[in-house]
Image (cartoon, grey):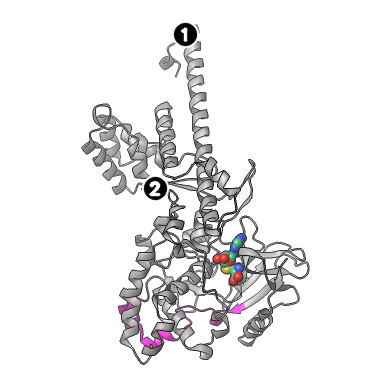
Amino acid sequence: MSARDTSFRAFGDWIQSHGGSLDASVMDVVTFPGQLGRGAIALKDIPEGYTLFTIPRSLTLSARTSTLPNLLGPIKWRNYELDKGWAGLILCMMWEEAQGASSKWYPYLSELPTEFDTPMFWKADELEELRGTSVVDKIGREEAERDYYKKLLPAIHSRQDIFSTNVIPEFYSLERYHIQGSRILSRSFQVEQWEGEGGDKDENAAADTSAESYSMDVADTSIGSGNGMDVDEDEGPAPAAETHHPEQEGSDDEDEEDTSDVAMVPMADMLNARYGSENAKLFHEATALKMVTTKHIPAGEQIWNTYGDLANSDLLRRYGHVDMLPLPGGGQGNPADVVEIRADLVISVLPVGPVGLTPDASKERIEWWLEEGGDDAFILEDDLDIPEAMVSLIRLLLLNSSEWEKVREKGKPPKPKVDAEVLSLVAQVLRRRLDEYPTSLETDAVLLNQDLPTNKRHAVIVRAGEKSLLHRAIEKVELVKDSQGKKRRVSAGSAEETGQSKKSKR
Ligand SMILES: C[S@@+](CC[C@H](N)C(=O)[O-])C[C@H]1O[C@@H](n2cnc3c(N)ncnc32)[C@H](O)[C@@H]1O
């Protein structure tokens, strides 16, 4: 049962009074029970390609539309590095909120959540439940707080005329900083400038919504298309996406990314998302963003945007929820789940010493691998294909000295070919990866049948999804190993029969 959100009408009026439009005859905002919170539903059958609402670009809230950057001055803005990462937008949101009803965004900001179910706010014992998953390392609380002390506070204290001392505890505290950052993480969109609007961006760009972590200096829009909501353009309106930023903290790309594209988009961020369910998307045009249906939506159904069909680990970290759907192979889970395997774990299964490389030789090859741009982590996906780069790294560490010299001369890592030796090592890697979780899959299954607090349930779902992938991948590797062994036995037998050697047959 969902309850009608009574503030929706007033919110719609506010949007319309600022030049936007909203068709309240086809959609409504309701509050769903449980974690879904507010969301939009279709009041009648809505055809594909229908514009549900339009938000003028001037009503989006970003470092481009807030007046704060100009008040502080562009030089100071840059000197405090507020043009990098999300620090600038966070400060704009703090400042706009401090203006109360005189801020253009007051009706919007006062509707935004102040509490989140994301691991950023979890206690240590709850975080322990996520051990083995890649979530904990990516929360980035410390990095986020570094920005607060290094960028925001100095800027705030430099101008008492703008940031009045007596409102600092209420609007500019570390706690408010995390709240604004989490709002951006779970609700922002990547809204590229329109050509002629001040930059020369592609006219047919899509707005991405979902940020990695506000600790990070940049939003990686490559994940945006996969992990966030994209804002596209086409002959008609283009779909805009939420801006979800990717993980690689400290990557060079991040520094190059134009984070002034990150924007809060009123109303568009009211839509929930579920794996494979998208039926509406945000498109951008010259002066406005439009939420347009991408499918026919029957009356009574929820209007879903997409957050990029993320793995549960990412959903939990950014949005504080997980997706659980019936899986094709039985059971429930999220088909987008992945397992991250660090290169050092792969390296740890390779023999060293008398039966393998000396530690120095191993180090030399690993350094070469990284210098050549080799990955330091590999992603196992639902297709269970062993990541090619991981196989290539294993082969690199198995080469004899002359093969290694040739590879180095050519400047190309070995081809990702698998044989029995490689498969055994891959299986060992996967088993060691499983050992990194404190519990077994069986224990998790038992736990999930119990009544668990929300955070713990989410943690168990995330780690169980990853473990299930690992178990299935091990099974597949063992099967391939067996079938390779059988093939070899058959060809060895037929070689004997024909009197040919295996080598001459090839
Ligand atoms: C962009 S907002 C959507 C609007 C939000 N429900 C609200 O009440 O304002 C994203 C947040 O909605 C919730 N949400 C979205 N999709 C969900 C889902 N499939 N299951 C549970 N919660 C979801 C999560 O709390 C998430 O952080």
Range covered by the magenta-colored residues:
55-83
The quarter of the displayed image where residue 38 is located: bottom right
| Vertical arrangement, residue 468 with respect to residue 133, above or below | above
Which residue is outermost to the left? 360
Q: Quadrant of ligand 1?
A: bottom right
Residue 85 - label: none
Instruction: Find disc 1 in the rendering and name its residue.
Output: 496
| Vertical arrangement, residue 89 with respect to residue 410, above or below | below
Residue 384, image x, y percentages: 52, 40
Crowding around mark 2 (Cα neighbors within 10 Å: few <14, some 14 to 19, many 20+) is: some
| Vertical arrangement, residue 231 with respect to residue 316, above or below | below
Query: Tag 2: residue type?
Result: Ala
What is the spatial separation of the Cα atoms under label 2 and label 1, in whole angstroms? 44 Å
Q: SS at mark 1?
A: helix
Residue 233 visible somewhere in the drawing = no
Residue 500, image x, y percentages: 45, 10
Which residue is outermost to the front? 451
Residue 262, image x, y percentages: 47, 72
Instruction: Find disc 2 in the rendering and name its residue.
Output: 377
- Magenta highlight on residue 80: yes
Task: Look at the numbered discs 2 and 1 and tell me whether their residues touch, using CB distance below 8 Å.
Answer: no
Residue 172, image x, y percentages: 40, 81
Residue 350 visible somewhere in the drawing = yes
Residue at image position (34%, 43%) is 344
Mark 2 within 8 Å of ligand 1, using the beta carbon: no
**Quarter placement of the C terminus:** top left
Q: Nearer the viewer, residue 503 or 218?
A: 218
Query: Tag 1: residue type?
Result: Glu
**Left or right side of 32 for 140:** left
Q: Nearer the viewer, residue 25 or 36?
A: 36
